[in-house]
Image (spheres, rainbow, N blue to C red):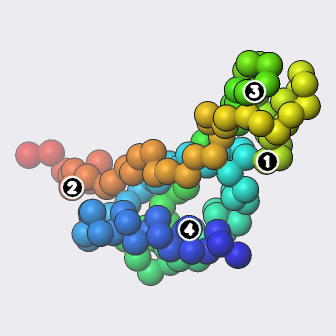
Amino acid sequence: MHELSIAQSIVSQIADRLGSTRVVTVTLEIGKISGIVVSSVRFCFDLVASGTIHDGASLVVLEPVGRAICHACSEEFTTTDPIVLCPSCGTASVDVVAGRELRIKSVEVMTCAEPADAPKP
């Protein structure tokens, strides 16, 4: 299951950059035709994050659809199928321009703000 190594890499990369800063939300972009199972990434993220600065962080996943351009007929089209074939002419000779993404889009961290219930001077 490569989703476990993906989750480990995400947690590691964020920890390397943020040190001991508490993470609240991680937003990922995982393309629909990337071959990555989003539900498995969610499960593995929670597992890997346990006991780290990511423990309890929410995971938001954006899933852009695949977009491709056909070499044979120049058709531009969208797809959610990882086997990309032109819907107009049926060829597999296409350039995939979106949908295989796997990236950390953003990380929200906890600020050192005063608690809301603290007494005012």
Q: Amino acid at mark 2?
A: Cys
Mark 1 surroundings within 10 Å by alpha-carbon count, few (fewer than 14), some (14 through 19), many (20 or more): some
Decide: few, some or many residues near mark 2? Use Cα within 10 Å; few <14, some 14-19, many ≥20. Answer: few
Q: Callout 4: helix, strand or loop? A: helix
Q: Residue at x 71, y 44 (%)?
A: 32
Per the rendering, the mark at residue 6 is 4
Q: Is residue 6 above or below residue 66?
A: below
Q: Who comes first in sequence, dot 2 or dot 3?
A: 3
Q: Is residue 60 visible?
A: no
What's the mark number on residue 70?
3
| Residue 63 image position (x, y, % from top left) | 65, 42
Within 10 angstroms of label 4, few (less than 14), some, or many (20 or more) residues? Answer: some
- Mark toward the start of the polypeptide (4 vs 2): 4
Q: Amino acid at mark 1?
A: Pro
Q: Is residue 15 visible?
A: yes
Instruction: Identify the residue under disc 1.
Output: 82
Residue 90 place in picture, x, y as percent: 91, 31
What residue is pinned by disc 2? 112
Indicate left or right for 75 with 119 as reference: right
Separation of residues labelled 4 and 2 (CA atoms): 30 Å
Frontmost of labels 2 and 3 is 3
Give whichever of 26, 67 is nearer the camera: 67
- Depth check, front residue: 19 or 10: 10
Amino acid carrying mark 4 in the image? Ile
SS at mark 1? Answer: loop
Nearer to us of marks 3 and 4 is 3
Mark before the other along the chain sequence, 1 or 3: 3
Based on the displayed image, in which of its 4 quarters is residue 78 positioned?
top right
- Secondary structure at badge 3 equals strand
Along the line of sight, which residue is nearer the eye, 20 or 84?
A: 84
Residue type (three-letter) at the residue carrying disc 3: Cys
